[in-house]
Image (tube, rainbow, N blue to C red):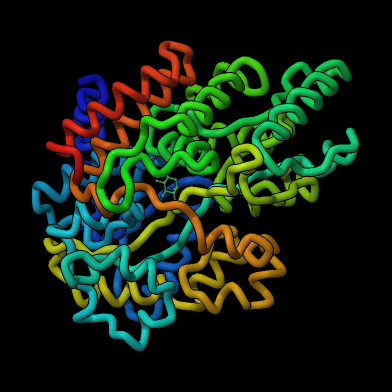
Amino acid sequence: MRCFELISKWSCVLGLWWLCCSAIAAQSAQLAISCGALGIQLTLCQEGVEAWSRRTGTDVKVVATPNSSTERFALYQQILASHSPDIDIFQIDVVWPGTFAPHLVDLSQYIGNDFTKQFFPTMIHNNTIDGALVAMPWYTDAGVLYYRSDLLEKYGEAPPKNWQQLTTIARKIQQAERDAGNPRMQGFVFQAKGYEGLTCDGLEWIDSFGGGTIVSSAGKVTIHNPQSIAALELAASWIGDIAPQGVLNYDEEASRGVFQSGNAVFMRNWPYAWSLGNAPDSPIKGKIGVIALPKGGEQGHHSGTLGGWQLAVSRYSKHPKLAADLVRYLTSYAEQKRRAIAASYNPTIKSLYQDEEVLEAVPFFGTLYQSFENAVARPSRVTGSQYARVSAEFYYAVHDILSGKVAAAPALESLHKKLVRLSRGEQW
Ligand code: GLC
């Protein structure tokens, strides 16, 4: 099958790259941590790690991983399957604890309830598999809508409440700005490349129309329904109208590139794009608004996919206690506060949402608190180790619909059948 062939091709390339990096890491350091490198993420990770190293005198190697969650997953799978001790701490996606649990240390033997009780209980629950706390929540995420406040004001428009309004406003401003001399202006950019990010965007569209969560929390495949079809038909109509054809190959950073260079009215992205968009050298500094993603019509509701990253200690680490101490430090109140202020990473400690310095740096952590708390989860818990396959089938189907290769109704009907087959019955 196309997606799994692709994943394995990637694993090969990434595996070789990784073996090379981690061998270098192991030679010189006592611990190695894998961190994301999106935006200024790697620098932030390095700063946190260095602060802990200074305190403890422990040398730590920070190893960058690919931006795409899908590619990172394939890479981790390979490393963990080989039981390699080269990487002690893995930064893992919110949808992976179930899959990687057998390879991870139970952190509750090193990190007590006095520490974990500060965190959102739902996140601790997500990371607790068969009674073992396999990861600590580092930062959380939810999809939000960014808009150019200066452009909306210029054209006398209010921020959209539903997707239909967004479509109309985006089309109007895109045309007016093109007529005024910017042929590159786009109405709306988002993540429509075939990867985990499209699962997040697609789930938001469908959930906002009341079309469910692909597989329900009870394990029933629910994807083929009129609301899902309507949501994806609307999204497909954006391609070549308010969104460029190229969006079919955009990930988070590609969409941010277009928006931040001043060439898009709206963008769907995660909160990290806020502080980068308002950086001193950003052309759109001070011209950005952030609101909840639009509702799917009058009957729908605001939605935002739950994302976020955790820190987990490998079962093959030679220094699990030391590694757990670094995890504790990186997920602490002070370190999460630093990351929230410097780079708008959403804290996983509840009281940080009442911290005045945090709210001053990222006001929408306060105004959109409900969206973060009620973000819609991908069906990873119920599908467990099968989640990556479920997600891949979903994002390939959505990509085909958006590309105009197949209409939404037959595509979702066939996706439904594939997922039912994968579940080996009507229910997971
Ligand atoms: C963000 C989210 C993560 C999601 C990914 C998809 O990094 O935090 O949960 O899987 O985007 O691209």
Which quadrant of the rendered structure holds the N terminus? top left
Position of 415 relative to 138 (above/below): above
Task: Write down the quadrant of residue 396 in the picture.
Answer: top left
| Residue 31 appears in the rendering | no
Position of 203 relative to 410 (above/below): below
Q: Is residue 421 left or right of residue 268?
A: left
Residue visible at 61% across and 42% down in the picture? 299
Residue visible at 41% across and 65% down in the picture? 138
Position of 107 relative to 80 (above/below): below
Residue visible at 35% across and 61% down in the picture? 310
Identify which residue, 84 or 25, lies in the foreground.
84
Residue visible at 46% across and 60% down in the picture? 140
Q: Is residue 351 left or right of residue 28?
A: right
Q: Is residue 91 left or right of residue 353?
A: left
Q: Position of residue 304 (x, y in %)?
A: 53, 49
Identify which residue, 256 or 23, lies in the foreground.
256
Residue lying farthest to the left in this orientation: 82
Q: Position of residue 25 (x, y in %)?
A: 25, 54
Identify which residue, 405 or 224, lies in the foreground.
224
Q: Position of residue 102 (x, y in %)?
A: 12, 58
Position of 321 relative to 2 (above/below): below
| Residue 85 appears in the rendering | yes
Q: Position of residue 62 (x, y in %)?
A: 35, 57
The tally of labels here is 0
